[in-house]
Amino acid sequence: MSTARLLEHHPLLARVGPDHLNRIAKAGELETFHAGEVVVTEGSLGDALYLVLTGEVEVSKAGHPLARLAAGNFFGEMALVEPAPRSATVTAAASSFLFRLPYLELQQLLRHDPRAGSALLVEVVKTLSERLREANRMVSSVGELADWLAGSLV
């Protein structure tokens, strides 16, 4: 099965047309990780976006688990904006098949096929926006709980 065929099932790329999908597929590479293998390390240079195609990965910061990401999720999206130190470590929690899209390849894609690169970036921004809304809801809920607890202790 071609890389493009594998990628077309990932939610991040669901609305990307076949021509753009083929160009994105050629810009990245498929990687396999076994349970316990580190994919990226906190503090190392973040230079690629990863799409989880199969399996599951665990995100941790300073050794504390933060999240588990299964097929259909992605991480490392900030590396598409600029290479910077990774904010967390990601380890395969199960055998996982990932697609790695390096920053430099995305830059080439944006230069040679702006529509394909833009289609990918728009989907990343939409997902980040959803994540931010969810984080805001959680922070708001924590604030409401704190206010309620403060009131019940008086």
Image (tube, rainbow, N blue to C red):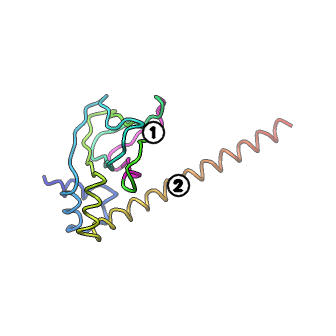
Image x and y of residue 128, in percent = 46, 56
Above or below — where is 140 with respect to 22? above
Q: Is residue 127 left or right of residue 51?
A: right
Q: How packed is label 2: few (under 14 Cα within 10 Å), some, or many (20 or more)?
A: few
Tell me the tag on residue 67. Answer: 1
Above or below — where is 100 with respect to 93? below
**Closest to the observer: 145 or 116?**
116
**Closest to the observer: 91 or 14?**
91
**Closest to the observer: 49 or 84?**
84
Residue topped by disc 2: 132
First to last magenta residue range: 64-79
Inspect the image, locate mark 1, and give the three-letter code of the amino acid beneath it. Answer: Ala
Q: In the image, is residue 43 part of the stretch drawn in magenta?
A: no
Residue 41 location, quadrant: top left
Q: Are marks 2 and 1 in contact (CB under 8 Å)?
A: no
Q: Residue furthest left?
A: 1
Q: In the image, is residue 65 part of the stretch drawn in magenta?
A: yes
Residue 46 location, quadrant: top left
At mark 1, the secondary structure is: strand
Inspect the image, locate mark 2, and give the three-letter code of the amino acid beneath it. Answer: Leu
Which tag, 2 or 1, sits closer to the chain's start? 1
Gap between marks 2 and 1, in whole Å? 15 Å
Q: Say which residue appears at 29% left-offset and 39% top-offset.
A: 55
Above or below — where is 6 with respect to 68? below
Image x and y of residue 142, in percent = 66, 44
Q: Quadrant of the C terminus?
A: top right
Image x and y of residue 93, in percent = 34, 33
At mark 2, the secondary structure is: helix
Image x and y of residue 5, in percent = 18, 57
Q: How packed is label 1: few (under 14 Cα within 10 Å), some, or many (20 or more)?
A: few
Q: Say which residue appears at 44% left-offset and 62% top-offset.
A: 126
